[in-house]
Amino acid sequence: MAKSIDVSDLDIYYGDFLAVQGVNMTIRARAVTAFIGPSGCGKSTFLRSLNRMHEVIPGARVEGKVLVDGQSLYEPGVDPVAVRRQIGMVFQRPNPFPTMSIYDNVLAGNRLNSKKLKKSAADDIVEKSLKGANLWNEVKDRLGKPGMGLSGGQQQRLCIARAIAVEPQVLLMDEPCSALDPISTAAIEDLIHDLKSQYTIVIVTHNMQQAARVSDDTGFFNLKGAGQPGHLVEFNPTEKVFANPDNDSTEAYISGRFG
Amino acid sequence: MTTLEKNPTPTESDLLPLTGPRLPTYAPALVAVAALALGGVLWLVLGSSVALSAFVAAVVFVVALPSWSRAVEGSRSAVDRLVAALVWVALLFAFVPLVSLLWTLLDKGLPALSPEFFTFSMRSVFGDAQGGIYHALVGTVLITLAATLISVPIGIFTAIYLVEYGAGNRVAKTITFLVDVMTGIPSIVAGLFAYALFVLFFGPGVRMGFGGAVALSILMIPVVVRSTEEMLKLVPDELREAAYALGVPKWRTITKVVLPTSMSGIVTGVTLAIARVIGETAPLLIIAGKTDSVNFNLFDERMATLPVFIYYSYTQPGIPAAPGYERAWGAALVLIAIVMILNVLARLIGKAFAPKTGR
Ligand SMILES: Nc1ncnc2c1ncn2[C@@H]1O[C@H](COP(=O)(O)OP(=O)(O)OP(=O)(O)O)[C@@H](O)[C@H]1O
Ligand SMILES: [Mg+2]
């Protein structure tokens, strides 16, 4: 049950600082949407506003509408915890739970919500999720060891496994491959391809080739100038964005002639 | 081999000056021994006081080592040696009172220790009859335990509010200020407060162990709040966000992610807070009072404690005075031993709870 996301006139603030302004877009269900743009233009900020993670930061707030399958995320009655259970997230920096083993890290979403699981079902989830994140072969002999004992790239794949273990309907990924080698990156991209049939996936990346390879739609964010809020410059099917973008600055950014 | 011959041998000026004259590695030790020997001569042969001899030895060390270094190594190394020498001397002087205290305690306290010392109370003990600290041990353990049971939940919940919920709002700032004020409350004032409080309920002249526990927890709560707060702040926000992103509610994130991650530090902080209050005398003198008999009931009658026992054994040793003094030193030794054991325990527990990173 994948879900589409409609964003209209979204302004995102950190206290008084307007970080992202006036975003309108429709993220299709069962498709991969990529966000590209220069550092600091608000890609992470926008991504975090899609599952109400933004408001976790003190003073941070959002104005505008985000509709997930027609349901507004920012209505007063909406429970952010319920939202996040359906819209999972992988962060820019790997953040496994230091007190937990690899096995428990994968099951964290289930365990922390005290879902009762039979041992065999739990084993299945762990194996499936770790295989999905291309980590199974490296850790299958030491599932009981601490998750912090893995390398940075392995930790990131552990976090991806942890996010897909709860089978969210939308998966938000903030530069999931920035710490990975080409082989793991390829595995994650394959994973994204597989997940696409069931989930809605949104990915932030600094890697143009990756955006071109994995995504169906691409959004280009940019800053009008230093200290100005970030905004969405162009949102189009990926082929169009990379072949003949509507906007000159998009073309300049993609072809590397930027600034 | 022609290429080699073409290479001119590097002259002295071509080489980077990576090496220079250095003092031998044993130089500081040598100077220290010489300085100490000088001090020893002053003390033993010329008969000056210990303090003066030690001072002279320290000054000689601090002056001689940098001078020698300056002559051989140059001024930058000399400054380095000077600072290092000062640090070492300061460390030594800081150790003097500690070592001397432990030495005195062991010297005077050890003879008092015997199985009876731990199992007898002071009930009907006159003259040099065998008496013990059993009643005071029981009182100290019970009162400290009660104080811990009161302070740990209050302290930890307060810290959780300050870090997880308050996050710099006005209530949190006010609480932080009040906690800071509480840290500075003199222990005698805490005792008077507990006494005044219990007089309200039980009338004047009230004495009970629980009152002592309340007084001690007033001293303990700010310490627990402060240490727990620091530990919770050390937990990276990324972990909280990771839990939120999995759809975990806030309270579960706190109990299952934040607290376990910081558990080792919190346990260490609590243990050190216990060690801090276990030797408090003044408040217990006021509200727990003094008795010679064993009392297991925190809520009735006077209750002896080790610090109060020490105080009375030394100020009113009885006739003859020697056994009383000896018991005071023995009890002091036991008290210090308990504090040390608590400190070691804090380290062990801290290690046991620390997040593992190994493979
Ligand atoms: N916690 C915060 N508090 C205040 N301002 C913030 C916070 N996080 C980000 N910002 C600001 O919001 C703007 C957008 O930041 P954001 O992290 O969304 O950029 P980004 O596009 O993800 O950059 P990158 O590609 O480097 O990850 C920046 O100007 C940044 O300084
Ligand atoms: Mg970012």
Image (cartoon, helix red, strand yellow):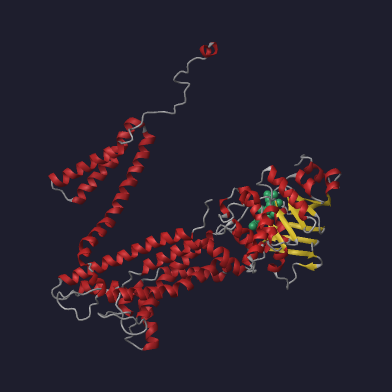
Numbered disc total: 0
Residue A103 sits in quarter = bottom right
- Is B301 or A247 nearer to us in this picture? B301
* Residue at the extreme bottom: B203
Left or right? Give the position of B290 relative to A249: left
Q: Is residue A167 above or below residue B78?
A: below
Q: Residue furthest top?
A: B2
Q: Name the residue nearer the viewer: B177 or B359.
A: B359
- x, y percentage for residue A16? 68, 61
Instruction: Identify the residue shown where x is 32% and y is 76%.
Output: B139
Q: Give A253 or A160, whichever is nearer the viewer.
A: A160
Residue visible at 36% across and 69% down? B277
Q: Position of residue B313 (x, y in %)?
A: 22, 73
Quarter of the displayed picture in which ligand 1 can be seen: bottom right
| Up-down relation of residue B114 to residue A209 (above or below) | below
Q: Is residue B229 left or right of residue A211?
A: left
Expressed as whole percent of the image width and height from the top left, the position of residue B116 reads 23, 72
Asked whether, in this view, residue A249 is left or right of residue B59, the answer is right
**Residue B258 relative to residue B98: left or right:** right
| Residue appearing at x 30%, y 53% in the figure | B95
Q: Quadrant of residue B2?
A: top right
Q: Position of residue A35 (x, y in %)?
A: 76, 51
